[in-house]
Image: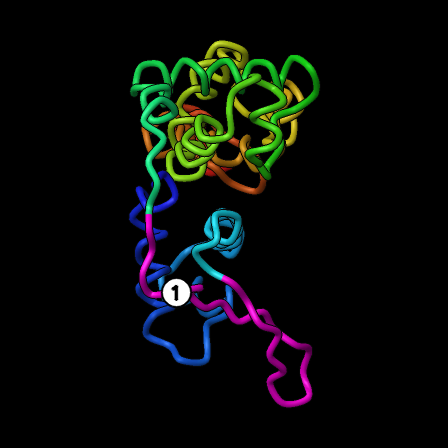
Amino acid sequence: MNVLANENRLLIIKFITESKEGVSASEIAEKLNLKISTVMSHLEQMESVGLIRFDWKRIGRGRPLKKYKLVDNYVTIDLDLAALARIPNKEELEEKIFTYISLKRKRDTLPVSLTVEDIIKTLNVDAKTALVLLDYLTEKKNEVAKMLASEVLEKFKNKKVVEIEKIARELKVHEYWAAKTASYLESKGLYKVREGKICRIEYEKGKEKTGK
């Protein structure tokens, strides 16, 4: 049921049903304007619960592609009410996300690719809870950036220019998350992002006035 409680996965299923030959991950990404990594995450989750399967198809002389199809047009859902009751509410969800991010950064770095298995291992939660958390992290990446942004503002409050690579290093996150955080700060009118760096708005305005 959790797998179906996602708008993008429902759109993927709809797209798959429209093709008799099946569709590839790249076709789904192009059709729905999603990143291929996001599509692959959705497909893996749907495949893991038996909603979809794939066949290898060769197009011309190129490499064979995975073409995804529904296992069946009709699905019987067995509800585990006890497990459903254990799924965290929004407040608990955000708390667990904060804990997960904090633990990953404390132990190593926050990776760009997040998995159910890693969330289970890090937080010691069941698979259904981990799947809900992964959905949140996948769909709400700006929330993660928002979480990290306050730390960037504090840590670099006396800096006019900071390299995104340095942000990643200091915050102990993959450079992807540092770039997302930089974009979030730019969207709030606090920084400009250029050439792999964030520059304070007042510093940029000063440069424009002096012509440097």
Q: Quadrant of residue 86?
A: top left
Q: Is residue 53 left or right of residue 204?
A: right
Q: Is residue 112 left or right of residue 77?
A: right
Residue flagged by tag 1: what amino acid is it?
Asp
Disc 1 target residue: 72
Q: Nearer the viewer, residue 94 or 177?
A: 94
Q: Position of residue 63 (x, y in %)?
A: 68, 77
Q: Disc 1 on helix, strand or loop?
A: loop
Q: Is residue 60 left or right of residue 182?
A: right
Q: Residue at x 32, y 74 (%)?
A: 18
Q: Residue at x 69, y 15 (%)?
A: 107
Q: Quadrant of residue 146?
A: top left
Q: Nearer the viewer, residue 143 or 165?
A: 143
Is 180 located above or below residue 74 in the figure? above
Q: Which residues are magenta?
A: 53-76
Q: Position of residue 133 (x, y in %)?
A: 44, 28
Crowd band around label 1 with a 10 angstrom C-alpha radius: few (<14), some (14–19), many (20+): few
Q: Position of residue 52 (x, y in %)?
A: 46, 60
Q: Residue at x 39, y 44 (%)?
A: 3
Q: Is residue 71 magenta?
A: yes
* Residue 209 is at least partly visible in this image: no
Q: Is residue 109 left or right of residue 183?
A: right
Q: Quadrant of residue 135?
A: top left
Residue positioned most to the bottom: 60
Q: Position of residue 187 (x, y in %)?
A: 34, 34
Which quarter of the figure is the N terminus placed in? top left
Q: Is residue 144 magenta?
A: no
Q: Residue at x 66, y 24 (%)?
A: 109
Color encoding of the figure: rainbow
Is 54 located above or below residue 8 in the figure? below
Is 161 located above or below residue 15 in the figure? above
